[in-house]
Amino acid sequence: MRRLSGLACAASALAMTMAGVSGALAQNARPIDKISNVIVLFLENRSFDNLFGEFPGAEGIQQAIANGQTLQRDATGKPYDKLPPPHKTGPFDVSDNPKEIRELPFGDRPNAPFAIDKMAPEITTAVNTRDLVHKFYTNRTQIDGGKNDLFAAYSDAGGLSMGYYSRDAMEKSTLWKLARENVLLDHFFMGAFGGSFLNHIYLVCACAPVWPNAPESQRSKLDADGRPIPNPKSAGDFEDTRVVAASDGDYAVNTTQSVYLNNGGQGANLLPPQTLPTIGDRLTAKGVDFAWYSGGFDLAAKPDRTEQESKYLAGEVRFQWHHQAFAYFKRFDPGTPEGQAERAKHLKDAEKLYTDIAAGTLPPVTFYKPSGRFNQHPGYAALDKGDAEVAHIAELLAKSPMKDSYALVITYDENGGFFDHVAPPSGPAAGARADFLGPATRVPAIVVSPLARKGVIDHTEYDTGSILKLITERFNLEPLPSPRVQAVNSLSKVFEAQ
């Protein structure tokens, strides 16, 4: 009996100890530990003001006007009497648009933001605008130290850069619906100045691709103020080319094709393999799976495409070679068996994404790059088709086996040359939260998750690196080496009780 009593006491003590351990673990548990899957949906080329400028409660166009933050100046600093028209072509001169819309003029417009959808009765979110220049030094110059007053002056699209979509146009969109019902981030900045190429690379490594000994012909040329020199042969264009000016190092910053995956349109000057660590490397080191899904990737990577298939890829799919961030890195060298195996495991076609979501076989970390038809890029992708793709992904996730534990981050690679009035972090006041690469113009960002707060506008300062920091914290990874990505606010804050 004494022995049984002793066993009972020991069992009781063990139970108390285990309860204490469980209590400590519960106390130390983080809200993000409940996230099973992080999915990043990376759309194209829209500033926050461009799509959410009239979203109720967000810092938008009305605040900008009230605070005198919209005035545009020419390159000498003189305010425009009226917005300058686009160079070369009209605002809607895009092959997808009907003839009568392509011929619509820009017209006389006051020096102020204006609603694109109010320019003519025919203009809706199904109509595409022309593309706008969006390059590294150009974007840095447009921001003008936070004044954001040189967007029209340093753009081939002139005053079109001041256009946005009204509440009437956006009210019924999936983007606005998801923003109303989930968490809208209204101080989220693109990771780096300029365009899609650099910002896709930044999304996976918080770094810029390196091009040692780049040909001089690929170098940007700047004036004494650090602004790109105008191209004397083409109005509205600047000497803002693939590689930074010599004084700024050896970084490729504007659209550059890779030796691994390119469309043959760049000649022999191709970016060498990249070797800096990526978030994929950090995940693999921890034994966590990841994948980059892209619309049209299987056909793009097919080595023996027919001429007809290549035309389909470029025309119907509108696949963009410089959007395939991981494919620039040596790990994914298609010329080696190891590289081919890495590609097969981690670089996948969007068709596989849909089935993986439905089956619950999505990797813990997923990046999705819609094909050109659905990414909302001005010039070749209208807003409504991209919005329908957002709806498709959101609906699949809401019905999936991960429906109670996923975190979907919907954001944009960069602003596409469109104006935004909020100054990005910069200078000594920003400390490590800003560097040579950025951050740059504010872009839309929405977090959709059953684990996040509902119907909230989060005014916290974030940038593209905040996504990487969330992934790093959720899966307990070794941080990437960038001081900035370690200094920015993590999207983990979205899941914390306020």
Image: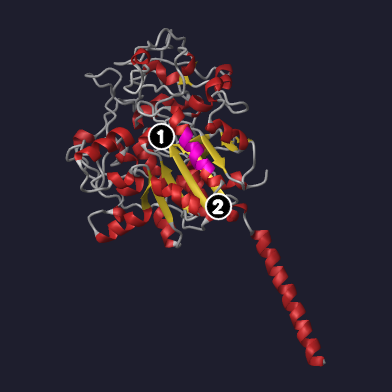
Q: Nearer the viewer, residue 131 or 213?
A: 131
First to last magenta residue range: 388-395
Magenta run includes residue 392? yes
* Residue 299 shows in the view: yes
**Residue 353 drawn above or below residue 10:** above
Q: Is residue 352 above or below residue 410?
A: below
Quadrant of res 220: top left
- Residue 390 falls left or right of residue 171: left
Q: In this view, does 367 lie above or below 12?
A: above
Please name the residue shown 34% across and 30% down the image: 135
Which residue lies under the disc numbered 2?
402
Q: Is residue 322 magenta?
A: no
Tell me the element at label 2: loop
The residues tagged by marks 2 and 1 sit, at their Cα atoms, a distance apart of 24 Å
Of the residues under marks 2 and 1, which one precedes in the sequence? 1
Q: Which residue is drawn at 23% across and 46% down?
A: 259
Residue farthest along the right direction in this orientation: 1
Residue at 45 percent of width and 62 percent of height: 286
Instruction: Looking at the picture, tell me which residue is in the foreground, 70 or 418.
Output: 418
From the image, which quarter does the N terminus lie in? bottom right
* Amino acid at dot 1: Phe
The percent coordinates of residue 70 (x first, y second) are 50, 18
Q: How many labels does the image show?
A: 2
Return the x and y of residue 81 as percentages of the image width and height: 43, 7
The reply, left or right, for residue 431 in relation to residue 382 is right
* Mark identifier at residue 374: 1
